[in-house]
Amino acid sequence: MNSACLVALAAGLISVAVANAPQGGQGGIKLDPDDVQVLPDPTDDIVAVRDGIKHGKLDLIEYESTTVGTRRKANVYTPPDYSANNKYPVLYLLHGIGGDETEWSRFATPNVLMDNLIADGKAVPMIIVMPNGRAQKDDRPIGDVFKSAPAFAVFEQDLLKDLIPAIESKYSVSRQQKHRAIAGLSMGGGQSLNFGLSHQDVFGYIGGFSSAPNTKAPETLIPDVSACKKQLKLLYVSCGNKDGLISFSQKLHRFAKANEIPHVWNVDSHGHDATTWRNNLYYFLQRAFR
């Protein structure tokens, strides 16, 4: 089975497993009046390679992981006209349980998204780092991908202690919280919320797209509401209204709403699929580092 099929299978298994999970004592997906789409679906040409504009670069790099005890890989996008004379903001973009460092590039082409957004003046030029969020020596998404779930939690240390320092030594990037973002899909969405909200001194912009059951409870992630309001620049939460995982995103939205924490809450008409992840990345990129 090829990697694209494996990603689809894993996403499908997660969705099926929780599609009828209890929510508030009742089965099925339950939508509140404010679980609505606030950002329209963009057209497919957002990922069309355009002639006549400048293009960035996408490179596969390796870095030394003391956490895992091996060299690990990450895909890194640098924007057009990248120069060591500038300090760039960085987005750490995380994949789902069946993916790896190439997943985002296969179905959402963040490099093309960014090239087009930069050309249209809709996004700040930034570096996008797409790592492998499975922090174990054999980090390939093969066999029973769910057995690797614990390695997604270990990635928190790999990210903070190994990957971020490696990126900051190799590229000309800002080391300020206000210039660092984290976002992801499904399992990676849960990671982004867990790691980002637990380290608001490190990440100023946080996005969870269709976040999976690994997402911690909002009360655990945001124990100090006042500090969160002061530190966080952007909290972006999204899910499809046909996605059985929506309850995890709803819980965070409801907590943020009840505590008046500013955030984006976008519930589109999709399921647990690549279209919603691509579309919400498109909007997240436009809001990051503004």
Image (tube, rainbow, N blue to C red):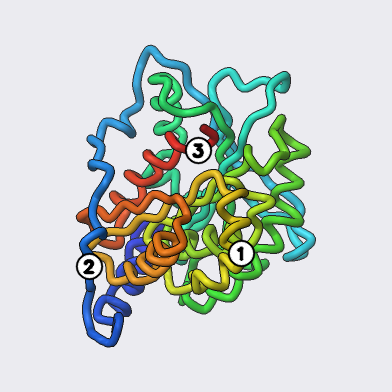
Q: Name the quarter where the N terminus is drawn.
A: bottom left
Between tags 3 and 2, which lies in front?
2
* Secondary structure under the numbered disc 3 in the rendered image: loop
Q: Quadrant of residue 69?
A: bottom right
Q: Nearer the viewer, residue 210 or 73?
A: 210
Q: Who's the residue at 47% across and 65% down the image?
A: 187
Q: Nearer the viewer, residue 252 or 1?
A: 252
Residue type marked 1: Asp
- Residue 7 - label: none
Query: How would you rate the neighbour count of disc 3 (Cα within 10 Å): few for under 14, some for 14-19, many for 20 or more?
Result: many
Between tags 1 and 2, which lies in front?
1
Residue 76, x across and y down, in percent: 58, 39
Marks 1 and 2 sit apart, C-alpha to C-alpha, by 28 Å
- Residue 224 - label: 1
The answer to whether 137 is drawn above or below residue 185 in the figure is below
Visible in this render: residue 92?
yes
The mark that comes first in sequence, 3 or 1, is 1
Q: Quadrant of residue 89?
A: top right
Q: Who's the residue at 36% across and 46% down the image?
A: 280
> Which residue position holds label 3?
288
Residue type marked 2: Leu
> Which residue position holds label 2?
31
The mark that comes first in sequence, 1 or 2, is 2
